[in-house]
Image (cartoon, grey):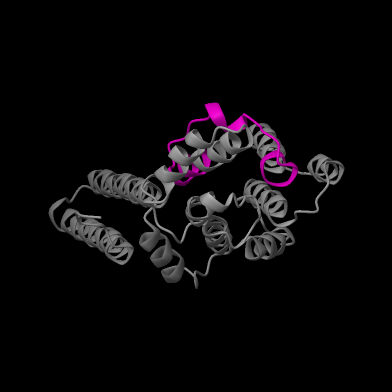
Amino acid sequence: MGGYKLDYKVLRKNYRLYIRSAGLLAMLLIFCIGLVVRDTLLQTCGVLLVLAGLVLFIQLLKKSYTNKCNTLLHVDLDLAFWQQYLQLNKNVKKVISQIDIKLTSVAYSFMMGDFDIVIKEAREALSQTDCPQKYKNFFESYLIRSIVLTDPDLSREELEGRLNELTITDPTLAEKTRKVCLALYDLTIAHQSNDYFEDLSNDFKYQQLEMIYYQALNATLKGDNSRAEELFRKLVSEDESLYIVRKAQQYLKDEGNRTSPFQSK
């Protein structure tokens, strides 16, 4: 891929540099106010104005930094950025930051097809009493999806039972998780068509690729092999470290032998 790709280490370094520079500038302005302004009320107003400006600047800078990270992680699916992000934040001190990095790690492992790691780390996170519910919702969603993708002997009744036991408090995510899991069950275990992924849309690249992959599986189950091949070929040019890309490559490689792509790793 051509063009300049932003390095996470550089992005984080610049963010911290801007924060420190803003703090130093604020201290300098407050010092100048103390020297130049003699009226106590005006001094107080000046200091409060500088501090308010500093807080506003930091909030805007933090928002810009977060948006840039989210774009590179999710919209662009820059896997090198993902790896740097996880590596450089693995020793964060704040508990909430540790949980956030754990969730990012689980998401990365899911994309790589390391579902056993997802199950292990998600269960560890869910067992933490200090894990906020909004994070537990996502951990639980990744957990149940990974179980479906790793257990070919899972029965529909067992899956229904697990879905009924979910404690996801976000109604939208709970409903989405349920529908995704049932669709995954049909497409990868029951080997029957399911149109759930056909009309979905998403701004995040991995989810877009995931939809293409399961649309291809659905086409295969419907006997539309030409559409399936067309969809799988859309995936093979992507990074082959992604689980769904490897599965698409496997399908195209084995197509002549009529080998099914339904089995997990």
Which residue ends up furthest to the left in the rendered image? Answer: 36
Which residue ends up furthest to the front in the rendered image? Answer: 256
* In the depicted structure, whether residue 251 falls above or below residue 228: below
Which residue ends up furthest to the top in the rendered image? Answer: 199
Residue 172 picture quarter: top right
Residue 232 lies left or right of residue 51; in this view the side is: right
Given residues 48 and 59, the one toward you in this image is 59
Q: Residue 9: x and y, percent?
A: 31, 66
Query: Which residue range is magenta in the image?
Result: 186-211
- Residue 172 shown in magenta: no
Q: Residue 212: x and y, percent?
A: 49, 39
* In the depicted structure, whether residue 59 falls above or below residue 95: above
Residue 169 lies left or right of residue 77; in this view the side is: right
- Residue 203 shown in magenta: yes
Q: Residue 229: x and y, percent?
A: 47, 41
Residue 207 lies left or right of residue 220; in this view the side is: left
Q: Residue at x 67, y 61 (%)?
A: 125
